[in-house]
Amino acid sequence: MVHNKSVVFLKHPTEFPVVGEHFAVQAKDLNPDLKENDVLLRNLFISLDPYMRGRMRNATNSYVGGFQIGQPLNGSGVSEVVESKNASYPVGTIVTGSVGWEEYTVVAGAQGLRAIPNARNSKIPLSAHVGVLGMPGMTAYSSLKIIGQPKAGETIFISAAAGAVGQLVGQMAKRLGLRVVGSAGSDDKVEYLLKDLKFDAAFNYKKGNILENLKAAAPEGVDIYYENVGGEQLEAALEVMKLHGRVIACGMISQYNTQEPYGIRNLIQVVGKRITIRGFIVSDFAAECSADFAKDVGSWLANGEIIYKEDIAVGVDSAPDAFIGMLQGKNFGKQVVKIADL
Amino acid sequence: MVHNKSVVFLKHPTEFPVVGEHFAVQAKDLNPDLKENDVLLRNLFISLDPYMRGRMRNATNSYVGGFQIGQPLNGSGVSEVVESKNASYPVGTIVTGSVGWEEYTVVAGAQGLRAIPNARNSKIPLSAHVGVLGMPGMTAYSSLKIIGQPKAGETIFISAAAGAVGQLVGQMAKRLGLRVVGSAGSDDKVEYLLKDLKFDAAFNYKKGNILENLKAAAPEGVDIYYENVGGEQLEAALEVMKLHGRVIACGMISQYNTQEPYGIRNLIQVVGKRITIRGFIVSDFAAECSADFAKDVGSWLANGEIIYKEDIAVGVDSAPDAFIGMLQGKNFGKQVVKIADL
């Protein structure tokens, strides 16, 4: 028997979710009652990601299963095995996998778990396994390569460039010899892009006219647009895009919490400039990219050739507000919640 | 010396072009004065195509050169060589190539001309060489194959389905075992799609709600959208598109003559459904598809396995009104102008 606090999904929001109305922290006793091959995890970090807003919709055609009313929200986490009936995951193993937004999670059959080798002695922080070394990192790595087809000398524009995916896309594009332009929602983030990540240009999308700022930052146009935001930034990107431009449609966070979506008025640019816009989810590219991703990004991170900023909220109680803050762009770097110390 | 009537470009329109203001028929004497390798053509048919509206823009980044103020408009034609200083194109040869919207055109060096073999004795009408056997046919054939990646059992939705490109796309998709749904702007055209072209479903986009009509015509969703129209039809197509859907962005005629473009509000579907939207121009696919196109479509047409409807205006004087009518959807079938009899 353990005492467990969880963030439970209460109701489908139509605009920004509200704590207490759409999700809330609830505490109850948990009797693990493990069966053959099950494990009980003590969660250390959970990942908060924009795509989760889509799982809050009352939709039938979402590409990831929706959250279940009355159940804890869930997503990627880093956890310690504290009880085990599975020989592959003995007590003390540190794992990543899908867990609840909660202190403890029972994983039936240890389904989808992956042990992190040498976790207790690594210089790489455990939280990286749900960020730069996890789903957001793999998202950036695979989609830039496969959809973006980047070539040295080209220009890439990345929206939400200081976010979980954007900061890695930018650094990878720099390594490949591209000119890298980013947007973010605060002057601090813009400074991070320019000084720490060595972007060639960056602007605060909340200041001045987005199209004018983008034109000034990319005067010769854009070959690749890494799309995390949608709305006005997508419209501006299409406007400055060059012939045979590619739009990597990773997400459109500006459209997730509104019932009045922004109307994109210049899609005709797709015809005239022979642009390709392609949406994806990271699992589309797993077979093709997983091995190279782990090798490349793992070594870059270990060698200090790339850096990765995280925004760490503390305690399961902080998760709902941190999630809403992320949807509003208040996070600075990849948003995680630290549930417990190792 | 010949007397020549031409349609001359006068001014860049911002909305629908107006005869007399933006283009007008002008007559003058033409002294061919041919140099080595030049030919003088007597034009028989000229092609009017929606993409030409883009060439009327005062734009620097158009993918085809803009029309020149004070010069005849130009495009594909079928012509007879009536004077020649080029041994490859003796007098009497029937050719296709780029010609003016006019009765006679001098083609320096016979640049870009192609002789039509057996032209005087073929059962295939000469006008087909600017339609189903020309640029529109090649457009349909190559883009359906390369961007569409059609598979038997899938559903395709084609807007402007009775037009120059759409009618061929639909018949090719039927041959490949797809379920074919089309839209058009009159009940006559809808009847043509259903009865003559054997579409599985079709609707008049001017009657009722486009999204509801499309949902009724494609209740299980759409795998491929062949996009000729843009605006509300694109929005509806995205709404009913299935996972991994493809949008073949051929044109967006609804957006060509307006300064207030329609805002597409549901592009977020591209992310959730992992849709690809790709623009192109026909020359992108020439190397890969030209030979197969000529063989396949040539034999289907000769054998009566496909049909092809043309809307033939008569006389160079009719070209401006026919062009405006085409932009308004008044043509029924591929729009050509018959300039002269052979």
Image (tube, coloured by chain):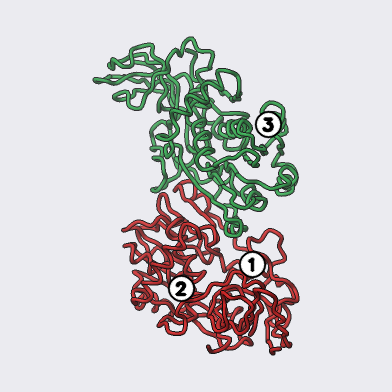
Chain colours: A red, B green
Residue A288 makes an appearance in the image: yes
Report how far apart the C-alphas of labels 2 and 1 lie in the structure: 22 Å
Identify residue for label 2.
Answer: A132
Identify residue for label 3.
Answer: B193
- Percent across and percent down for residue B97 are 40, 25
Q: Secondary structure at mark 3?
A: helix
Identify residue for label 1.
Answer: A54
- Percent across and percent down for residue A96 are 54, 75
Query: Of all residues shown, which one is farthest toward the top?
Result: B121
* Same chain assignment for discs 3 and 1: no
Q: Residue shown at 44%/60% (left/top)?
A: A144
Q: Residues within 10 Å of mark 1 (few under 14, many from 20)?
A: some
* Same chain assignment for discs 3 and 2: no
In contact (CB < 8 Å): disc 3 and disc 2: no
Q: Quadrant of residue B109?
A: top left
Mark 2 vs 1, N-terminal side: 1
Does B137 sit left or right of A194 as displayed? Answer: right
- Percent across and percent down for residue B13 are 49, 43
In contact (CB < 8 Å): disc 3 and disc 1: no
Q: Amino acid at mark 3?
A: Leu
